Every structure is written in C-alpha cells, then in structure tokens.
Image: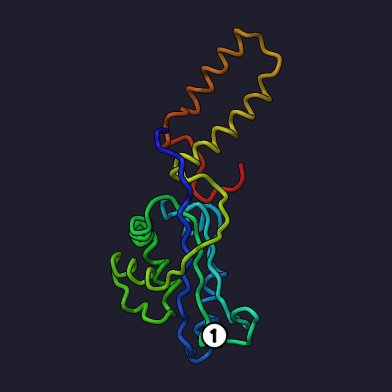
Amino acid sequence: MANLISEPTPLTVLSPIKNGDDGSQTFASLTRKYLQSLDIHEKSPMAKVPNTFLCRFFVLNDVFFEGSPGKVDHLKSKYLVFCCNFHGDLNTYLREFWQNAQQEAQKIWRHCVAFEQVHDAESFIDYIKKCELNTTIYFNGSTGLPLDEQLKALYLKQEFSQFACEKQGLSAEALFEAFQEFVERTRPADLTGPTWKPGQNTL
C-alpha cells in the first residue's frame, strides 16, 4: 500500500429540475420517487462507481432566506442535489461514474434541465461541472486512500479482532502457527480479496 494519504475530494452538485409534470406528477416528485426507490449499501448503484467514499442525493424544494441579515428569497425551481466524497481527480471520477452506472445516472438526472444533451462520458462531465458548487466545508469520514485499500483495511481490522478474541491463551508456538494461517487466509497485501465489498456496512 504505497499510496500517500491525502484528503478525499468533495463534490457538491445542484441540478435544476424542470418545472412542470408528466400529466400526473411533477418532475420534482418523480425525481424524488426514483431516488427513494434506489437500493442502499452493497446494492446501491453508487457501489458500482469506483472510489466513492460516501454520497447523498436529495431534492431541494426551496430556500427562504438569503444573505445577512436574511431577506426572503425563493428558488425559481427545485434542484436535484448530489453530494459526495471520492478519491482522485474529478474528471476521472465522473468518467468512471458514467462508465459503471450510466443507466442509473440517466434515470436520476432525466428530469433535470438540459440533461437531454448528455449522451456520453464527456458530456456527463461537462454537465456536472456546470452544476457544481464550490465545496468549502464538508464531512470527512475517511482518509484519502483509494477505496480498495480502505475496504481491505476494514476487512483486516474485522478479521484480526476476531482472531485476537479466538486465540486467547494459546502457547507462543500455537499462536505463531495460527497467525501464519491467518495471514495465508486473509492475504493482507492482496487488494482484490478477500475484502469488504463497496457499500458494505455490516460484517
């Protein structure tokens, strides 16, 4: 694990949702309904996007005050908000987002203004950048190491804790032998496995 530890990269995106409806529900309601239907944890579509540390989608209905002292203000449309922390540079992350979760991205943003112009990875990158806000304060829940290294570290922490509990009281010789078996089974230097899966939150 030779990568240097760095801060995760934050991303905040506000995409305006089209005003109007499909004849029965507003486009904002349809967007919210689809977001609520998405699976979470290992089955989340974002688990397929490499180097996603954490993320959140939600629909922003309105804001009521602006500036200081606050004055009443309202948005002209509702917004789809996407916030995430990821490893690496933005272009690479968004390109891999499109390559690994294109269908989900199209469904999530389909009711947003001008998203019909998105048809490949490069136009997806351009679109997200146009909707990006500068992120000054964000939650940092991890190191900046690549996701596969962090998942392997979580797996090893889990397995070593269990090993320590189970091997209490062994002689030095038996403990050494058990530890060799532990290393062979867990393969600490092998990031491909065994390891935690992206999105996994329980043992």
Residue drawn at x 41%, y 67% as measured from the top left: 105
In the displayed structure, does residue 24 sit left or right of residue 130?
right
Residue drawn at x 49%, y 56% as measured from the top left: 85
Which of the pair 110/74 is nearer the observer? 74
Residue drawn at x 34%, y 68% as measured from the top left: 124
* Number of marks in the rendered image: 1
Rendering coords of residue 151 (x, y %) = 50, 41
Task: Work out whether 144 lies above or below 35.
Answer: above
Task: Work out whether 84 lies above or below 145.
Answer: below
Rendering coords of residue 112 (x, y %) = 43, 79
Task: Name the quadrant containing residue 106.
Answer: bottom left
As shown in the figure, which amino acid type bears the numbered disc 1? Leu
Outermost residue to the front: 69
Task: Work out whether 175 lies above or below 59.
Answer: above
Outermost residue to the right: 169
Task: Work out whether 94 lies above or below 189.
Answer: below
Judging from the image, the colouring scheme is: rainbow
Rendering coords of residue 53 (x, y %) = 50, 52
In the displayed structure, does residue 24 sit left or right of residue 96?
right
How packed is label 1: few (under 14 Cα within 10 Å), some, or many (20 or more)? few
Rendering coords of residue 126 (x, y %) = 32, 69
Kindly state the secondary structure of the residue where label 1 is placed.
loop
Residue drawn at x 36%, y 81% as measured from the top left: 114
Task: Name the quadrant containing residue 129.
Answer: bottom left
Q: Quadrant of the N terminus?
A: top left
Q: Quadrant of the C terminus?
A: top right
In the displayed structure, does residue 18 sit left or right of residue 154?
left
Q: Which residue is mark 1?
A: 75
Which of the pair 106/64 is nearer the observer? 64
